Image (tube, rainbow, N blue to C red):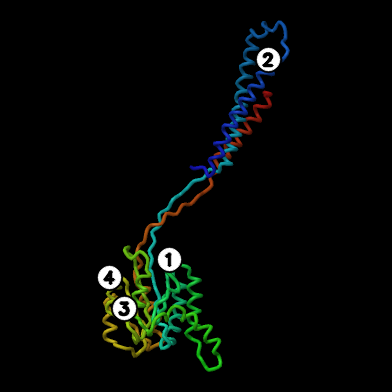
Amino acid sequence: MELNSPWVLYIGIPVLIALCLIKFKKNKEAKDLGKKIANTEFVKETSYFKNLMKKYKILRALAIAFCALSVFFTLLLIARPVEVQKQSKEEFKRDIFLCLDVSSSMDHINAEVSRTLKDMVKGLEGDRFGIVIFNSSACTVIPLTDDYEFVIQTLEALEASFSVVYDGTNIAEKQRISSFIENGTSERDGASIMSDGLVTCAFDFPDLDKERSRIIIFSTDNALNGDPIYTMDEATDVCKDKKIKVYAITPEYYTDEKGFTRAITKTGGKVYKTDSEETVSAVVKAIEKEERTKVDDRTIAAVNDKPQIPFVLLIISIISMLFINKKVGI
C-alpha cells in the first residue's frame, strides 16, 4: 500500500506530537498551581486509593492514546492510502501508409481508394495510419497516427478533391477543393514521379531500425514524366531493405506492366488492377491478413483507493475513546 499524499503525515505527525507535549505541560502546570489538601497521606497509603489511582492512570493513558490514534488515522485517510497495480500489456501493431499519385489521370482511382479505406480505418485497433501524396514532389499529409477520426476526415477531403469534375462553370469550386492535393506536390518540373514519392513515403516510417510490420498502399499508373532521383527498382529496393511491403493499385492498363510488377513483388507485396469494383477491397483484405508485429510492452498502472483499514481503525479508536472518556475526565 502506498500513500498518494504522504506529505500530510510528514506535517501532521510532528504537529500531533507537539500538541500532545503542550497538553501534558499544561496539565502539569495546572496540577502544580492547584490547592493542596492537608492530611491526605493516610488516604494515599490505603490499598483502595492505590487501586483507584492505578485504574485512573491506565484509563487516562488509554484515552489519550486512542485520541492520538484517531488523529493519526484521520491524517492517514487524508493522505489517501492507495494500491498501485501494474500490468504489462503486449501490443501488436501495423504501420500503414497510403501513398497516392495525385496526377489528374489517377483521380477516379484515388477517389475509390479514399472512399474504401475509410471503412478500413474505422476497423483499425492500435495500428497507425499515415498519408503521403505526390506528383512531381511528395508531401506528407498525415504522419503515422492512431487518431482515426482525423484520418477519416482527411480521406473524405481527398475523396472530394479527386471527385470534383470541372464543367466550365465551377472554376472557383474546382480550385478550392483541388488545392488540397496540389499544395506541395508540384515543387519541380514533371509529373507522376512515383519512385521518388515511394521512397519519400518509405522514409516517413519512424524507427526503421526497429522490427515492425510496415505496409504501403501505393496508387499510381506508373506514367513517369520527369527525371526521378530513384528508379522504380531502386525505390522498391529501399522498401525491401527496410522490410516494407508495397501493395500497388493501378489502372487496368498502365506503363511498363512487367517491370513495375517485378519491382513491387520483390517487396513481398502485390499489384492490383482496378478492373473491378472489388479491387480496393481485395487490397484491404490482403493487408488485414498481414501479421501485426509485437511492439514494446506497455505497463499500465491502476491506482485503487484503499481507505477501508484506516477507516475501520479510526472508528474503533473513536468509540474506544468515547467509552473511556465516560469513566475518566481528561
* Left or right: 124 in relation to 246: right
Mark pair 3, 2: CA separation: 100 Å
Mark 3: few/some/many CA within 10 Å (<14, 14-19, 20+): few
Q: Judge depth for marks 3 and 2 and give the one in front.
A: 3
Please tell me the numbered disc located at residue 116: none
Q: Earlier in the sequence, mark 4 or mark 1?
A: 1
* Left or right: 240 in relation to 81: left
Q: Is residue 92 above or below residue 24?
A: below
Q: Judge depth for marks 4 and 2 and give the one in front.
A: 4
Mark pair 4, 3: CA separation: 18 Å
* Image position, residue 284 (x, y; %): 39, 77
Q: Secondary structure at mark 4?
A: helix
Q: Residue at x 28, y 83 (%)?
A: 261
Q: Amino acid at mark 1?
A: Gly
* Image position, residue 131 (x, y; %): 43, 74
Q: Provide the residue designation for mark 3.
A: 229
Q: Are marks 1 and 2 in contact (CB under 8 Å)?
A: no
Q: Are marks 3 and 1 in contact (CB under 8 Å)?
A: no
Q: Are marks 4 and 3 in contact (CB under 8 Å)?
A: no
Q: Amino acid at mark 4?
A: Asp
Q: Residue at x 53, y 94 (%)?
A: 168
Q: Secondary structure at mark 2?
A: helix
Q: Earlier in the sequence, mark 4 or mark 2?
A: 2
Q: Provide the residue designation for mark 2.
A: 32
Q: Earlier in the sequence, mark 3 or mark 1?
A: 1
Q: Is residue 249 above or below residue 166?
A: above
Mark pair 1, 2: CA separation: 76 Å
Q: Is residue 65 above or below residue 275?
A: above
Q: Amino acid at mark 3?
A: Ile
Mark pair 4, 1: CA separation: 25 Å
